[in-house]
Image (tube, rainbow, N blue to C red):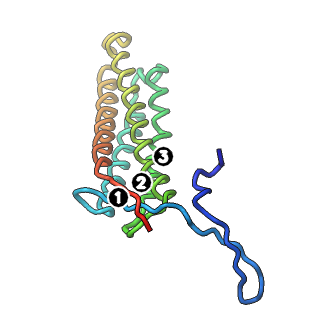
Amino acid sequence: MTKNPYAEDYELVSEVDARGREKQAAVYRGRYFELTVERHGLSRFKWLCLLLTAVLFLLHVGGGFVNNPGMFQAYVSLPYAAAFFPLLYLAAGVLHLPREKPRYRRDEIGLSVERMKTSSRILLIALALGLLGETLFILFVSGGEALGGELLYLGLEALAALAGVVMLRLQRAIRFKEIVI
């Protein structure tokens, strides 16, 4: 497998400039796609995704600032820490969403839309594991101690998971199809 999965979509073309020097340029020869977003335009979709990503980040980081004994357990803290990686990739995918134009290259779709969809799913899994771990800690380990902090953390993470579900539902509106040129 190649290091760049989109390398076969480009071709090196040699050109001679006005001074007689030969220059090589990469020319895209791959497939093009049309991207449509149901219910609203691509720019509004991008702003909604940016807003939801910021809300997810603030809720998740805010949950980490809560002083609760459950965060000292590996089954609570590891999913919390692991959720930052898909959150970072989600933000990168949202920031790489292309602007409105008639056709998109395969790498533009893969590095934005597909990255965003995949990282949203993984983020939701990490948040669900963290919620499960915190719930198990409250039910079986805590014994009712520091319940206020535990419930605050659980509420913030539940709201973050809800924002993740909204993000996934919003991504269902994205459709792309291949354009024959």
Residue farthest left in this picture: 39
Q: CA distance from mark 1 to mark 3?
A: 15 Å
Q: Quadrant of residue 165?
A: top left
Dot 3 falls on a residue whose secondary structure is: helix
| Disc assigned to residue 89 | 3
Q: Amino acid at mark 2?
A: Val
User: In this picture, is 60 found above or below 13?
Assistant: above
Residue 48 placement (x, y as % from top left): 30, 55
Q: Earlier in the sequence, mark 2 or mark 3?
A: 3
Residue drawn 48% across the image and 52% down it: 110
Callout 1: helix, strand or loop? helix
Q: What residue does disc 1 label?
A: 46
Disc sitting over residue 37 in the figure: none
Q: In the rendered view, would you say 150 is above or below 105?
A: above
Question: Mark 3: few, some, or many residues within 10 Å (few <14, many ≥20)?
Answer: many
Label 1, residues with CA under 10 Å away: few <14, some 14-19, many ≥20: some
Total labels drawn? 3
| Quadrant that contains the N terminus | top right
Between the C-alphas of marks 2 and 3, the distance is 9 Å
The alpha-carbon separation of the residues under discs 1 and 2 comes to 7 Å
Work out whether residue 4 or residue 120 is closer to the camera in this orientation and state it.
Answer: 4
Q: Are marks 1 and 2 in contact (CB under 8 Å)?
A: yes
Residue at the spot x=32%, y=34% of the render? 156
Which residue is identified by label 2?
A: 94
User: Residue at left 46%, top 20%?
Assistant: 75
Q: Relative to 147, is 67 above or below?
A: below
Give residue 38's position: percent from left, percent from top. Answer: 25, 56
Image coords of residue 169 (percent x, y):
28, 44
Asked if residue 92 lies left or right of residue 6, the reply is left
Q: Alpha-carbon neighbours of circle 2 within 10 Å: few (<14), some, or many (≥20)?
A: many
Among numbered discs 1 and 3, the one appearing first in the sequence:
1
The amino acid type found where label 3 is placed reads: Tyr
